């Protein structure tokens, strides 16, 4: 079975491997739950099905958010490796992600994605599962990773 990896605005590293030994930062659970609710409410109001929470996607969303914080920059680095692992662990046929940085709230992150045609297309895509990771760096800036798959 061929696996399709859908990603918009990809910036991958040469090795495209998931780095080890990245410091783990605490999750901002309330903001994660709020963002997941907002995305599902948007999908429902637009005629799309709600997305189920995925522990597998959450694990890799968290890893990527930690990676972005360690790098101090927003990125889709290593997306192909994340997508491949998620596909293997869940039998997913399509994987995508949205990332964001510097939004002060879940609503602001959602609005940023909604106002970007590529991010909106991902949020409204033909997916069944998702997970959102939100973490704050030492300077107080929020980083967001949302993974989607079907």
Image (cartoon, rainbow, N blue to C red):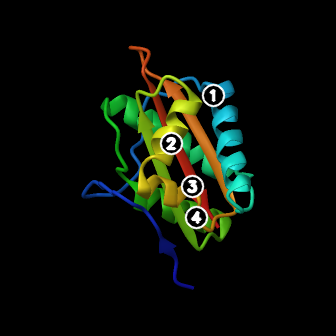
Question: Helix or strand or loop: what does disc 4 sit on?
Answer: loop
Image coordinates of residue 64 in percent, x first then y, are 46, 42
Question: Helix or strand or loop: what does disc 3 sit on?
Answer: helix
User: Reading the chain from its start, which is encountered first: label 2 or label 3?
Assistant: 3
Tell me how far mark 1 sits from mark 3, CA to CA. Answer: 17 Å
User: Residue at horizontal 72%, vertical 46%?
Assistant: 41
* The quarter of the displayed image where residue 23 is located: top left
Label 1: few (<14), some (14–19) or many (≥20) C-alpha neighbours in 10 Å: many
4 and 3 marks in contact (CB < 8 Å): yes
Disc 4 designates what residue?
Answer: 125
**Front tag of 2 and 3:** 3
- Vertical comparison of 113 with 91: above or below: above
Disc 3 designates what residue?
Answer: 123
Q: With 80 as the anchor, is 132 left or right in this view?
A: right
| Residue 145, numbered label | 2
User: Reading the chain from its start, which is encountered first: label 1 or label 3?
Assistant: 1
Label 4: few (<14), some (14–19) or many (≥20) C-alpha neighbours in 10 Å: some
Disc 1 designates what residue?
Answer: 31
Image coordinates of residue 139 in percent, x first then y, are 38, 14
User: Residue at horizontal 64%, vertical 33%?
Assistant: 32
Question: Helix or strand or loop: what does disc 1 sit on?
Answer: helix
**Front tag of 4 and 2:** 4
């Amino acid at each position: 079975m061929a696996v399709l990896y859908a990603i918009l605005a990809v910036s991958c590293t040469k090795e495209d491997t998931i780095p080890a030994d990245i410091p783990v930062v605490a999750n901002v659970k309330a903001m994660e739950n709020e963002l997941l609710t907002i995305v599902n409410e948007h999908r429902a109001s637009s005629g799309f099905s709600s997305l189920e929470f995925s522990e597998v996607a959450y694990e890799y969303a968290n890893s990527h958010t930690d990676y972005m914080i360690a790098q101090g920059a927003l990125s889709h680095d290593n997306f192909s490796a994340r997508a491949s692992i998620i596909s293997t662990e869940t039998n997913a046929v399509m994987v995508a992600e949205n990332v964001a940085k510097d939004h002060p709230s879940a609503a602001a992150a959602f609005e940023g994605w909604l106002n970007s045609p590529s991010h909106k297309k991902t949020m409204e895509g033909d997916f069944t599962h998702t997970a959102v990771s939100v973490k704050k760096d030492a300077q107080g800036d929020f980083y967001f990773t949302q993974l989607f798959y079907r």
